[in-house]
Image (tube, helix red, strand yellow):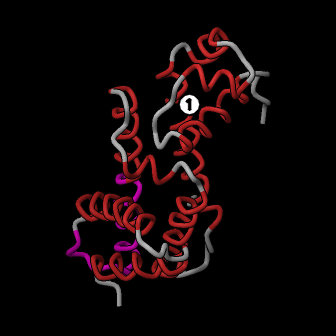
């Protein structure tokens, strides 16, 4: 993997920290001071504040896709076992990233980010639908479940369910949250 140019990664790291510290609000002056770089460096690397935020959102969702990818799951397991593991990885990823509560609980601050987030959610829903179709083809999921509706429902439910779990007091462990959410997924899909 190629290293990011000097300054670019500093800005990304500082911007992530600033978003967390500011609960989703980022102030460019504080950001460039904490990164030790000029505002010109921000515009050079990202073109705009929106470009910087897009890079942060991209990194978050790319990391999520990697964390829940098939390469990390037991290839020889039955559908429910494999997908319960995927659910656990989905939950753990969100619980481990301090940016997740902000991304899940706040509206994106500009239209470019709203469109980007919608595209990621749409892609996750499509992947979930195809995964459900695979479970149906293998005979491990009931055929009466509409994969497209179920995929969208499950991704939306997971996102909102994780957001709710992260707001709960006391905050459950990732394993507790996974168990709660998996029971809902299993009931939705007719898994016993």
Residue depicted at x 34% and y 32%: 115
Question: Residue at the location (59% across, 12% down)?
Answer: 43
In which quadrant will I find the N terminus? top right
Residue 181 % position (x, y) = 39, 75
Badge 1 density bin: few <14, some 14–19, many ≥20, Cα 10 Å: some
Q: Residue at x 51, y 22 (%)?
A: 51
Label 1: which secondary element: helix
Corner quadrant of residue 45: top right
Tell me the magenta residue range: 125-145
**Looking at this view, is 84 or 71 the one in front?**
84
**Foreground: 178 or 42?**
42
Return the x and y of residue 125 as percentages of the image width and height.
35, 54
Q: Is residue 33 left or right of residue 113?
A: right
Q: Position of residue 92 (x, y in %)?
A: 57, 66
Q: Residue furthest bottom?
A: 192
Q: Is residue 6 left or right of residue 78?
A: right
Asked if residue 59 is positioned above or below residue 98 in the image, the reply reads above
Residue sitting at x 60%, y 25%: 30
Who is closer to the viewer here, 151 or 48? 48
Q: Is residue 48 left or right of residue 125?
A: right
Majority secondary structure of magenta residues:
helix
Q: Is residue 117 magenta?
A: no
Placement of 64 over or under 83, stated as above or below: above
Q: Which residue is mark 1?
A: 55
Residue 155 pos. (x, y %): 36, 59
Q: Is 129 contained in the magenta span?
A: yes
């Amino acid at each position: 993997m190629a290293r990011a140019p000097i300054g670019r990664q500093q800005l990304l790291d500082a911007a992530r920290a600033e978003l967390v510290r500011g609960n989703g609000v980022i102030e460019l002056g504080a950001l460039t001071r904490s990164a030790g770089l000029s505002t010109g460096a921000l515009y050079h690397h990202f073109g705009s504040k929106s470009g910087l935020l897009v890079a942060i959102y991209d990194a978050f969702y790319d990391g999520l896709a990697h964390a829940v990818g098939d390469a990390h799951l037991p290839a020889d397991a039955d559908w429910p076992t494999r997908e319960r593991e995927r659910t656990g990885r989905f939950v753990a990823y969100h619980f481990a990233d301090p940016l997740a509560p902000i991304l899940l609980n706040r509206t994106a601050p500009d239209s470019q980010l709203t469109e980007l987030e919608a595209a990621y959610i749409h892609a996750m829903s499509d992947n979930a639908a195809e995964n459900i179709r695979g479970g149906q083809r293998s005979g491990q999921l009931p055929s009466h479940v509409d994969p497209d509706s179920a995929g969208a429902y499950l991704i939306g439910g997971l996102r909102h369910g994780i957001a709710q779990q992260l707001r709960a007091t006391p905050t459950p462990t990732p394993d507790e949250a996974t168990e709660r959410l998996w029971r809902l997924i299993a009931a939705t899909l007719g898994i016993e």
